[in-house]
Image (tube, rainbow, N blue to C red):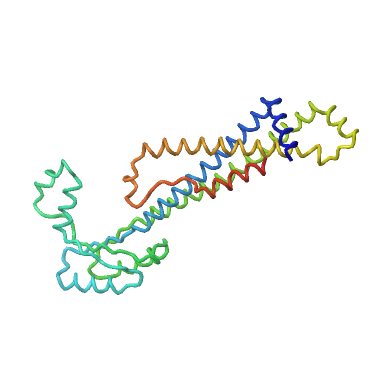
Amino acid sequence: MIFFVHKALKDILENRLLNSVAIVTIALSVLIVSAFGLFYINANELLTSWKSGIRIMVYLSPSADNQAVSETRKMLETMAGVEYVAFIDKESALEVFRGQLKGQGSLLDDLKENPLPDAFEVHLGVDTRSEEQVDALAQQIETLAAVTEVEYGQQWVGSMMSVLNLFRLAGYAMGGLFFMATVFIVANTIRLILYSRREEVEIMRLVGATDGFIQMPFFIEGLLQGLAGAVFGLGALYVSFLVITSNIGQDYFGSGFQFQFFPLGSCFLIIVASMLIG
């Protein structure tokens, strides 16, 4: 085996240009396909974080009295999938809105009356976060007499999931194309090296070398090309990941979300897969 590895390394050094092309191709393949995968993982985690924070805002009729508000609250709390209900009176809502305007809160000083309605903030249970479940619960809430409007962001999350699925399919397609390109270039690299050494191979056969003995250095050469390409590709992806995430404020996406790179186990699988392709 030491002889085979030494022979493979010698071939790589003697054919630097051909092997460099193969390694760069593998590195680009790993970089692009892994970038799609990394984007999908983080976007999916971000959507999961957002979905866990989905709340249904239930706006009440201006004519709803205290008894109607109390009865509505009891009905909401007894509905399946509701974890708890928080009442937000219109005065508190106006103060929150004023705080969100920051330096422009004076715009609300000329209001003759509070235009905001009383509302309930309905927090959902862990098992009630699919699009169908939230839709069904929202429709049930809309039937209550004191309710004028129901608002939630599930439709937007559903649209984002469709975009994510499109990215996943694009990643599969790009992965397939680069897989074929990588195999083609590595195979032609080995073929050119074999052609340049055809006389040496013929002599080895004449003196009794088996096909396995002749082929093994080329197999090892392909493994080393795949290893080098995967390391360079993952290295470039990690540097790009650090640069991008350092310039994006994670608080913008919510306090419970953090960007993540591939775990060591996934990196190892990517390297092994790259070596096998090589």
Is residue 182 shown left or right of residue 81? Answer: right
Give the total number of marks visible in the rendering: 0
Q: Is residue 181 visible?
A: no
Give whichever of 83, 164 is nearer the camera. 83
Relative horizontal placement of residue 179, taking residue 163 as reference (left or right): right
Q: Position of residue 155 (x, y in %)?
A: 39, 55
For residue 204, which quarter of the picture? Answer: top right
The residue under the point 75% across, 36% down is 3
Q: Looking at the image, which is closer to me, 176 or 42?
A: 42
Quadrant placement of the C terminus? top right
x and y percentages locating residue 21 in the rendered image: 64, 29
Residue 231: tell me if it is visible: yes
For the residue pair 111 and 202, the one nearer the viewer reads as 202
Q: Residue at x 57, y 46 (%)?
A: 268
Image x and y of residue 60, in percent: 21, 64
Residue at 38% of width from left, 67% of height from top? 136
Q: Is residue 149 above or below residue 190?
A: below
Left or right of 254? Residue 190 is right
Q: Relative to residue 77, is residue 277 depicted above or below?
A: above
In front here: 196 or 28? 196
Q: Quadrant of residue 115?
A: bottom left
Residue 195 locus on image (x, y percent): 80, 28
